[in-house]
Amino acid sequence: MRALAADMASSMGGTDGAQFLQVSSAIFYGLSSFLITVVNKTVLTSYRFPSFLVLSLGQLTASIVVLFVAKRLGIVKYPDFSRDIARRIFPLPLIYLGNMMFGLGGTQALSLPMFAALRRFSILLTMLLELLVLGIRPTLAVKVSVFAMVGGALLAALDDLSFNLQGYLYVMITNTLTAANGVYMKKKLDTADMGKYGLMYYNSLFMILPAFFGTWLAGDLDRAWQYEGWNDPLFAGQFLLSCVMGFILSYSIILCTQHNSALTTTIVGCLKNISVTYIGMFIGGDYVFSWLNAIGINISVTGSLLYTYVTFRKKPSSGSGSGSSGSGDTNSTDKKLLLPAGGRIDNV
């Protein structure tokens, strides 16, 4: 898919090629995020798998194995291990692990419609972090759409009949980590000289042992071992699919962040929740309908649609004649803002 997108983009040239990469990478991320959310919910709730920690451990393992084999076969390239790699990509591994674990915990504890609504708080946090870390100021239209999404989520939460305090806490932690992951991923892609494959591989590699140890201390390894559903081929297949989809999702996040802004990546991840929201009313069996909750969810969805229009509409040319365009090449803009003369970003 990546090679096909690159070929099509090169044949289009200039502004159209850049816009194609932005849109195609966003669609790829949206589809990946939708599939893994549905599969995770099915495994953790419908099949009542006892441990989201073990599932996250499986996703880490799949990423390491796939990337290691791919590098051996010459399919992908990333730097060999060295002592300074951890320092160069810190704090991404910690953010990556926490985001994965708490996200799965929230998926297990909450209904998908409420999980989707609450996840939209990550958009506001990302917008604030982009301003502080990358120096990107959102337009008025972006601010209006973001506040509509967050306001709708708050309204829905006011009448959540299946309220789960632990689930709410997990989701809010995930929102904070998602915002941090998007912004710092953008920074590391441009400054750490690791490449998207290197970031994916070493994020997983550095966290696999701490994750395994923590899962063992929590007693989840034993609970997963005693789970009776391993003999069900359908469950086993979906568990393995969830592990592999963790790798695909990580790749799609990095690809989308590389060709768009960190805020756009977060928004796309929440846009897929439009379909997840309504399908989730029937998956898992843990959603309790109320009118106030439904109205809030739909307001949040409307805000997501508004942001999609504002972000991906074709922008007019700057008319400078210098070969640059006003098409919203956020990758170039972000890169310039990463290294201000005063060095403020380098000290963050």
Image (cartoon, rainbow, N blue to C red):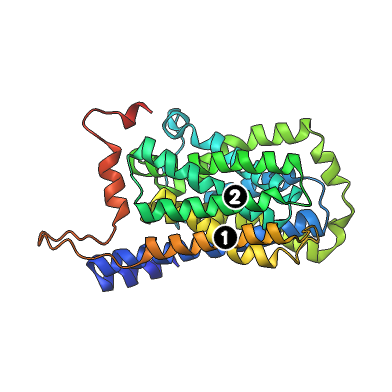
Q: Residue at x 37, y 36 (%)?
A: 133
In the orientation shown, which residue stands out farthest toward the left? 321
Would residue 58 be found to the left or right of residue 32 on screen? Answer: right
Residue 129 percent across, percent down from the top left: 43, 39
Q: Quadrant of the N terminus?
A: bottom left
Rounded to the nearest angstrom, the CA distance separating label 1 from label 2 is 14 Å
Q: Quadrant of the C terminus?
A: top left
Count every numbered label the image shows and give the total.
2
The residue that label 2 is drawn on is 119
Would residue 171 be found to the left or right of residue 228 on screen? Answer: left
Q: Mark 1: give few (<14), some (14-19) or many (20+) Cα within 10 Å.
A: some
Q: Amino acid at mark 1?
A: Ile
Tell me the SS state at disc 1: helix
- In this view, the residue in front, 174 or 230, is 174
In the orientation shown, which residue stands out farthest toward the front? 292
Specify whether residue 279 is in view: yes
Residue 242 occupies which quadrant of the picture?
A: bottom right
Tell me the SS state at disc 2: loop
Checking the image for residue 120, the label placed there is none
The residue that label 1 is drawn on is 299
Q: Amino acid at mark 2?
A: Arg
